[in-house]
Each structure stands twice: as structure tokens, then as C-alpha cells.
Image (spheres, rainbow, N blue to C red):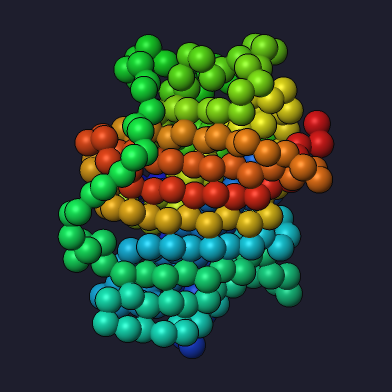
Amino acid sequence: MGHEFDSQIEVEGKGEGVFSADLSAGWVVGGGVNGGYLLAVMGNALRASLPGKPDPLAVSAHYLSASVPGPATVAVDVRRDGGSVATAAADLRQGEATRITALATYGDLGRLGDDVRTTAEEPDMPPPDECVPNTMAPPEVRAIAPLMDRFDMRFHPDHVGWAVGRPSGNGVLSAWFRLADGRDPDPISLLMVVDALPPVTFELGMPGWAPTLELTAHVRARPAPGWLKVRHETRNMAGGMFEEDCEVWDSTGRLVAQSRQLARQPRG
């Protein structure tokens, strides 16, 4: 039996680089459909357009307007298809409105070797059973975020002050993450994972929807099966906008994805 996530990001080729999709209501958050889920839908269309290069390496997406559940199309324009990497542009549209425009580089992560050198430090997390499950999120948060039913998320105990009216003010959120249907992570799903946690502004005492303006994701390796560790941090808020930096680590302790997004400050 197939997994829920795969059916929800499914695309169907219509010819000339155009794919149809049906955006799931289960990924709504705040005033629209979650941006990471939408990026995974687009990532699926890009993968289908680039035979032999199944994995996103770098994706930069600009969010033009909020998407709604229902029919959508993804138009892919392959700009260059080289020996090891390919670059393509993609637009996600609903009716006459372009929701997202993106530029992506794809390749085969299995052919890139295993030379890892990093000064990044894996988040120090208690075991999942000692962390706080997303099912304990306040009712008002769950009401605006049906997407929280799509996954199992266990927050670091030090990063859940926002849920009880005592945000830390540190601008950091971290959690264990896995899809609720048991599907193991892969490079396409990582495009969703980098935008799956609540906005880091929750820990600054600013609950509410934080619409993404731009998101750049780098997928560094194919993740191992099992739990992921996800960490979000912000250091600067200005002009009603904040940056959110994300790291995703797999069950072997390897950094498998990074992202930065610019988002609007929640309006309460």
C-alpha cells in the first residue's frame, strides 16, 4: 500500500513540461497551504522532468501568493541538462495566478561521493520519548494548522515554552520529526521538512501564521531511514520580516539538508 505523502505530492504529466497536481487540504496552515509541502510537489514535477537526475541539490523558491487546496499545475522549463547536474525553472499555478516561482539544480546524490567535512554540530536532543509531542500543541494552534496531523513531531523540552505562554525569547526551535504514515525520508520529502516546524517566532512570543517570501533549500545527502532531527533558528527581525535557518540531521547523525527562508512576522 502506498504512503499518504506520496499520493499528496503526486503529479501527472500533461505534455510540454506541464504537470497537474491536487493540493491537499491536509497541509493547510494559517492562510494557505504549507510552503514546504508545495515545494515537494514542485520537486516531484522537476524530478519527472530530469531523467537520471532524481535528487534536488539546490532549490530557491519565491512565494508570490498563498495557495489553496485543490487543482494546480506545475510548469517546468529545463534550462540546462549537463553531465552531472541539470538546472530548471518551475512555476506552480492555480488558475491565472502564479503561486510560486522557483529555480532548481538537480543531480544524483548517490554519485557525489561520501567526503564529509563539517563544523556544524548535531543538535543535542533527549530521546523522542522524553520530548514533547505535537499532539500537545494548544488547540488554537492545531485549529490553524491541520498539517500537524501529517507528521509525528517531538519538541525539545526547552523549546516548548510558547505552547504554555512562556516563550524563551531565544529564537530557537528543535524537534524530532517523522511522517505519521511511517514513510521514510528521501530528498524530495526534505523539501517539505525544512518548512514543517512551527515558525521560530513562536519562541519569540509571536504566535500566528508567518508567510514565506523566499526559501532556499540545499539537500546534502540522501537521508537514512528513521527519525530526523530538525533545528530552526532566527537571529534578526527587521521591517516586519525575519530569517529562519534550518538544519536537518538523519538517524546516522549526518547533516542532510539546510535551508534559509525570509518570512513575514506573524500579525497575531
Q: Residue at x 68, y 47 (%)?
A: 263
Q: Position of residue 123 (x, y in %)?
A: 38, 28
Q: Position of residue 267 (x, y in %)?
A: 81, 36
Task: Say whether residue 113 is left or right of residue 179.
Answer: left
Q: Position of residue 72 (x, y in %)?
A: 60, 66
Q: Is residue 78 above or below residue 164?
A: below
As drawn, which residue projects farthest toward the bottom?
A: 16
Q: Is residue 234 above or below residue 21?
A: above
Instruction: Place residue 160 in its image quadrant.
Output: top right
Task: Say whether residue 108 is left or right of residue 141.
Answer: left
Q: Is residue 112 above or below residue 144?
A: below
Q: Position of residue 124 (x, y in %)?
A: 36, 22
Of 25 and 92, nearer the camera is 92
Instruction: Place residue 56 in its image quadrant.
Output: bottom left
Q: Residue at x 48, y 14 (%)?
A: 157
Q: Residue at x 46, y 33 (%)?
A: 231
Q: Residue at x 65, y 50 (%)?
A: 262
Of 239 and 40, nearer the camera is 239
Task: Say whether residue 41 is left or right of residue 56.
Answer: right
- The answer to whether residue 181 of the structure is visible from this angle is no
- The answer to whether residue 242 of the structure is visible from this angle is yes
Task: Say whether residue 246 is left or right of residue 161.
Answer: left
Instruction: Place residue 210 in its image quadrant.
Output: top right
Q: How many marks?
A: 0
| The C terminus: image quadrant | top right
